[in-house]
Image: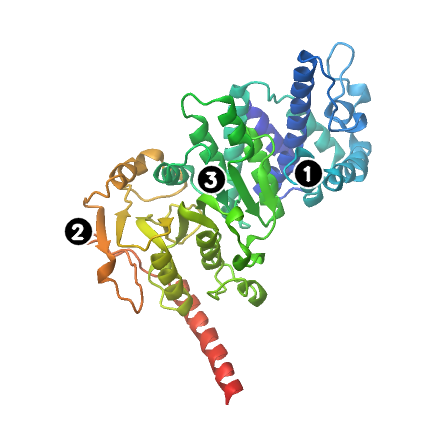
Amino acid sequence: MFEQTFKNIDDILHKDAGCTSELDYTEQSSWLLFLKYLDALETDKATEAALDGKKYKAILDADYRWEAWAAPKDAKGKPDHNNAMTGEDLLQFVNGKLFPYLHGFKQRATGPNTIEYKIGEIFGEIKNRIQSGYNLREVIELVDELRFGSQEEKHELSHLYEAKIKNMGNAGRNGGEYYTPRPLIRAMIQVTAPKIGERIYDGAVGSAGFLCEAFDYLSAKPNLSTRDHRTLQTNTFFGREKKSLAYVIAIMNMILHGIEAPNIVHANTLADNIQDIQDKDRYDIVLANPPFGGKERKEVQQNFPIKTGETAFLFLQHFIKILKPGGRAAIVIKNTFLSNTDNASVSLRKLLLESCNLHTVLDCPGGTFQGAGVKTVVLFFEKGAPTRKVWYYQLDPGRNMGKTNALNDKDLTHFVELQKTFAKSAQSWSAEMSAINTGTFDLSVKNPNGGDEVAHRSPQDIMDEIATLDAESTELLATIRGLV
């Protein structure tokens, strides 16, 4: 129903000088979708209040509501084109009045978990990039056709929005950071098996794919009470995101999936010292695909006991620390983490194996992440007891992965089924930790059933490790000189 509308919006944005990629199309669609959603939310709240004999106090002042500036209607409820701003007038209002007014909500909000705070945060982080007021008018009229009234309409909009995020992930300019294949996420959730009342966290939230899929998983449980639904809305899903565009997309994605005021904080997770994490800060479940390949500054590294510039390794330390005792995690990471010989990798594997039960390693084939040449594994672990045995599963869909042959749910059904009992097969086996080399803590994927050893390292990985070892050597020499 809405698919053509989304396509038409992208076609208009493609013509605008201010929008140059799928990332821009998604960003600009997002702020307009958010305001249209807010209008629908206010209408619903006003109706509910009237039915209860109460008066509803609108979030937005009259001049800034959707029907006032974006889509005025005549006495018959039809679009009033004579009173609708366009061209330069529309741009001046949006850039000079609307965005500053909405940004001001951050200061006026009673707390960070309110819809008012989210409004202020979003409109302080993004800008209107649409340079033609006539293009903006056309896009607004298309967005106005969208409806958020029924669950079916919200469901369709959420699917279309997910498709936009996926396209953005294939569009370059680091868009791939925001998109983890949904079949992989769903398999990770099935294995961790969250329950109503458990708190779920993603400290590298991206487009909030993990939280949205976990919400869908828990919402589908039978016989949920009103209290259960309230728990899902307010005290189940938590995330943090450093980048402005990803933050906005995460909020919009969760709203379209049915969470009114998402608990997403706009902050750099790695800027916090993990020694400051207290029991009240901990979570039952961590689901994440932290960015890898990043190089963090020295002052950020000081927040972690194991010093490394590799972003994903810092995130893994954070996730281990923030889990409750008995808490469960499923984390995507580069497969070279299992075998790298640099000090940080060895120390981190030792920490993981000694403080958590790493019960499952899912080895993903090349091409699982479209647009990313790296091979990945998923680490499944439970905090509180050391690892005794690791069950490996080597995922092999039987075809080359790519945009036209993307990972699907059926590809992962065998893994999910066998994982329940850690069953042996041609693709799965177990490794006893008593046999591990305690000098290297090497966890390489070595299929004893004749499969290829798949922890092959790319030239870039080898070069990165050489650079890391060089830096460590330089630092050690400087320390020695300082002592002499």
From mark 2 to mark 3, how far is it between C-alphas? 33 Å
Q: Name the residue under label 2.
A: 449
Q: Tell me if label 2 and label 3 are in contact, CB under 8 Å.
A: no
Image position, residue 344 (x, y; %): 42, 66
Q: Nearer the viewer, residue 408 or 130?
A: 408
In the depicted structure, whether residue 292 falls above or below residue 70:
below
Tag 2: amino acid: Asn
Q: Mark 3 points at which residue?
A: 210
From mark 1 to mark 3, how far is it between C-alphas? 23 Å
Residue 389 visible to an observer of this rendering = yes
Label drawn at residue 335: none
From the viewer's perspective, tell me whether residue 153 is left or right of residue 343.
right
Q: Nearer the viewer, residue 106 or 253?
A: 106
Q: Name the residue under label 1.
A: 117
Q: Which of 360 and 396 is in front in this view?
A: 360
Secondary structure at badge 1 equals: helix
Q: Tell me if label 1 and label 2 are in contact, CB under 8 Å.
A: no
Tag 3: amino acid: Phe
- Number of other residues with Cα within 10 Å of mark 2, as a class: few under 14, some 14 to 19, many 20 or more: few
Image position, residue 179 (x, y; %): 48, 43
From the viewer's perspective, tell me whether residue 190 is left or right of residue 300.
left
From mark 1 to mark 2, how far is it between C-alphas? 55 Å
Among the two numbered marks 1 and 3 on one chain, the one whose residue lies closer to the N terminus: 1
Image position, residue 431 (x, y; %): 23, 54
Residue 137 occupies which quadrant of the picture? top right
Give the label, 2 or 3, closer to the camera.
3
- Number of other residues with Cα within 10 Å of mark 3, as a class: few under 14, some 14 to 19, many 20 or more: many
